[in-house]
Image (cartoon, rainbow, N blue to C red):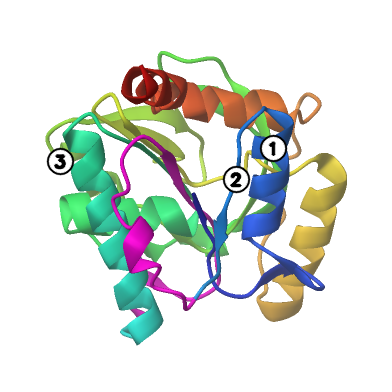
Amino acid sequence: MVWAGSGTAWASVGWGEPVAEVLTSLGWHVSVVPWGDPAAEHQGRPGVLHVFTGGLEPVSSGTAAMADRLDAVRAGLAAADADRASVVGICLGAQMIAAVSGDVLPEAVPGGGEVGTTTLRGRGVPDVHVATAHVQQVPASYLRTPGVRLTWTDEVSTVQGFTVGPRVAGVQFHPELCVVEAGWAGAAFTDLLTVPAAVGARGPLDPARSLGSVLALAGAQRVVRTLAA
């Protein structure tokens, strides 16, 4: 289940579509829940991977759509805690996971954020070359939440990636975007906001590999196999 965030990544392309495309290429059967659809019947659905994508509406917006999506995150985390689902959050999705599981709201990125491509340092996992576009971030204080482990970091945002137990992973970056898509998303993002360019990635972007690494941290394949057995 891909729970799409608000707005578009670039012209006429929603935040859920690039994620769905990469997941499909990895062999997943994908359903996309548009922003504004509560999809109550799928909240906390067991035996599936729940992916909460990037988006433009902030966690603290207070809208009905955000409240519904936070409910979906909460239900997904409960299913993951019961070892019955896996949850991945990307950018806004990671911020929603932190808000629900750690009661911490996103904070502004010092220096104004980053956009483009970058290389992140792994903490117990390999470094990754990825797309990035954010002005808000999961605060470092979230790392004090029981069960949270840091997975990726850089000089711009301390918490570029994390896990919460064996079934939940969040990333501040965009593992689903190739270098061309990173350019499109970056241009669209800077049309809305003035954002500093990220330090360029030191290697090629490989969305299948980078998103696959995030899925592995969330135990995505294991939970599906276990519940299908």
Residue 193 placement, left or right of 173: right
- Residue 225 lies, in percent from the top left, at 41, 19
Q: Quadrant of the C terminus?
A: top left
Given the image, on which type of amino acid does mark 1 rest?
Answer: Thr
Residues tagged 2 and 3 counted as in contact (Cβ below 8 A): no
Q: Earlier in the sequence, mark 2 or mark 3?
A: 2
Give the residue drawn at x 46%, y 46%. 157
Q: In which quarter of the view is residue 30 placed?
A: top right
Residue identified by numbered label 3: 145
Residue identified by numbered label 2: 30
In this rendering, the answer to whether 84 lies above or below 213 is below
Label 2, label 1: how far apart the Cα atoms are: 7 Å
* Other residues around mark 3 within 10 Å, as few (<14) / some (14–19) / many (≥20): some
Given the image, on which type of amino acid does mark 2 rest?
Answer: Val
- Residue 193 lies, in percent from the top left, at 65, 76
Q: Earlier in the sequence, mark 3 or mark 1?
A: 1
- Residue 178 lies, in percent from the top left, at 79, 40
Q: In which quarter of the view is residue 212 placed?
A: top right
Whether residue 175 is visible? yes
Q: Earlier in the sequence, mark 2 or mark 1?
A: 1
Residue identified by numbered label 1: 24
Closer to the eye: label 2 or 3: 2
Label 2, label 3: how far apart the Cα atoms are: 31 Å
Given the image, on which type of amino acid does mark 3 rest?
Answer: Thr
In this rendering, the answer to whether 191 lies above or below 145 is below
Whether residue 198 is visible? no
Give the residue drawn at x 49%, y 28%. 215
Residue 60 placement, left or right of 131: left
Read off the magenta span.
Answer: 36-61
